[in-house]
Amino acid sequence: MSLDQLYQQIILDHSKARHGSGLAGMAAPEGTSTGQSHQLNPVCGDEVTLRLAVENGKVAQVSWDGAGCSISMASASVLSELAEGMTVEELHQAIDSFREVLRSRGKIPADPELLGDAAAFEGVARYAARVKCAMISWVAAEDALNQAA
Amino acid sequence: MAVVSTPVTLERALPAMDDAEVLRIRNDFPVLNQLVNGQPLVYLDSGATSQNPLSVIEAEQEFYEQRNAAVHRGAHHLAVEATEVFEDARQTVADFVGADYSEVIWTSNATEGLNLLSYAFSNAGLWAAQGRGDEGLSELALNPGDEIVVTEMEHHANLIPWQELAFRTGAALRYIPVDDAGSLRMDLAGGIIGSRTKVVAFTHASNVLGVINPVAELVGMARRAGALVVLDACQSAPHLALNVKELDVDFAVFSGHKMLAPTGIGVLYGKQELLDILPPFLTGGSMITTVTMERAEYLPAPQRFEAGTQRISQAVALAAAVNYLTETGLDRIHHWESELGQCMVAGLEAIPGIRVLGPAAGQDRIGLAAFDVEGVHAHDVGQFLDSKGIAVRVGHHCAQPLHRRLGLTATTRASAYLYNTTDDVDQFLDAVAGVRAYFRA
């Protein structure tokens, strides 16, 4: 597998654009129920603090701060874009599906219908050392979602 | 006929190492002869773990094929042979670092050696408090008010065991800071190592900065304070000629797997008079004289610290590794690796956006270089290099406090050994030069 299959264009773009980044400067919308989670990968020092706001059973906002490699930052960015507007149930489903793909060692393809841009992380599944990088913000989102909803 | 009056050592007689010799050396290392991601492997991660020459692999295999038995027990033929090669290995390794035979204690690795030591120190306090053991033990015990001194550049293995020893004994842990360039603040060391100091533990050569610390100066300060010295020789013993008696340290540790030997074997050196009175850490079989249902008496060092069946084949393999290094010549290896280290640093400094940690080009360093790539995380750098068959280490290299001090969380480290050519370094530098463009930094 080539490096470009791991670092797909979408990943490189999102690692720079970082949708939802800037937790401190972004207040949660009024009247929403929020959850916040901090996750750390002790192996590489990747860190994500992610806040999720839920209103009427839907994800109203995802905002996060983080430091880490392009995979982890792009993953948090893609997740933020994808999650907003989803129902709580839909996001749980997306997180479960993303985890299944990432843990499959490349055996289970991503469903672009369900995962959107996050399907680009399918290639990461072949790099065992990088799976946690892609997962870190999704683990934070799951934790935050359980608090908020 | 004129008589040559000056004896010429074998080492002096050999010319300096060059790429041609290194290419011959590489033939001894089967693992280096492979493609990774379609490219010839460039292995620049020996600072983490080194590769094994055939002579080491064969020594371990030969032990299992011909001599495998438990040592120091049993009167049968194999047991006697196994004991002989096991103890011969100890002598070989002792000679390698200038120690006496019974001053070399086998451990799993340097981490275990440092933990063994820290627990032996806290056991010294427990024994002394109950009047057990040698009278000198109270001198070795740590109490509230005492201090342990380390440095800010330590590997976690030479930091956390001392944090925990301080916790167990009530002693305080202090450290000598580093400056922005990563050198020890020796101007402050004299004020930190003082009359309260009982132990000074520091690394000989930094696994991140590549800097070689001023051992003599630190030992001098420790001696004036009446403190014991513990040397982490993990990054020095494999790469330069080292003599523990000349360095005058009280204890030293190193790991076999960083010096051409397999994993699972390491060494704790200690001065005989200290080892003989320090209480053991692990207790059990093979380290006792008399055992009753109530208590036990212990053998002197080294058996005192080697409870249970030992890592016999690994010790034999470490001796083979030491022979390989000795035959090549430690001074020649050191010189070659210093050259490679200088090439790395000079090359890295010339690439825009690269910040090399530790001494600048032209200043002394061992054959490794850790660096930050502006705008690109170390994990991505490592992945990019791996796609070109180049193996480096990424992360904090078990030195989080040092990285924090330098304002970083993770760096990329290339570390050379005697089997690396200048071409390896050139390929590495070429690849690094392409990193920022790929990640659009």
Image: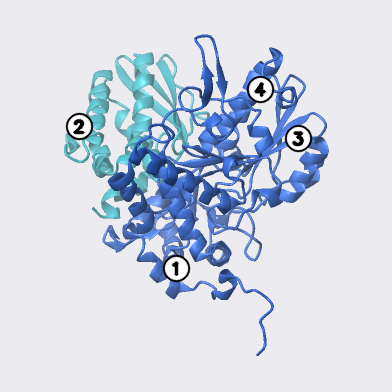
Chain colours: A cyan, B blue
Label 1: which secondary element: loop
Q: Nearer the viewer, residue A61 or A122?
A: A122
Pick the quarter of the image with the N terminus of chain B. Answer: bottom right
Distance CA(mark 1)–CA(mark 3): 42 Å
Q: Position of residue B156 (x, y in %)?
A: 56, 36
Distance CA(mark 2)–CA(mark 4): 63 Å
Q: Using the image, tell me which numbered label, if any, was put on residue A114.
A: 2
What residue appears at the point 83 percent right and 39 percent down from the top-left corner? B224
What residue appears at the point 63 percent right and 33 percent down from the top-left corner? B275
Depth check, mark 2 against mark 1: the one in front is 1
Amino acid type at circle 2 is Leu
**Could you tell which of marks 1 and 3 lies nearer the N-terminus?**
3
Q: Which residue is mark 3?
A: B227
Amino acid type at circle 4 is Ala
Q: Using the image, tell me which numbered label, if any, was put on residue B421.
A: 1
Q: Residues within 10 Å of mark 4 (few under 14, many from 20)?
A: many
Q: Is residue B328 visible?
A: yes
The furthest residue to the top: B294
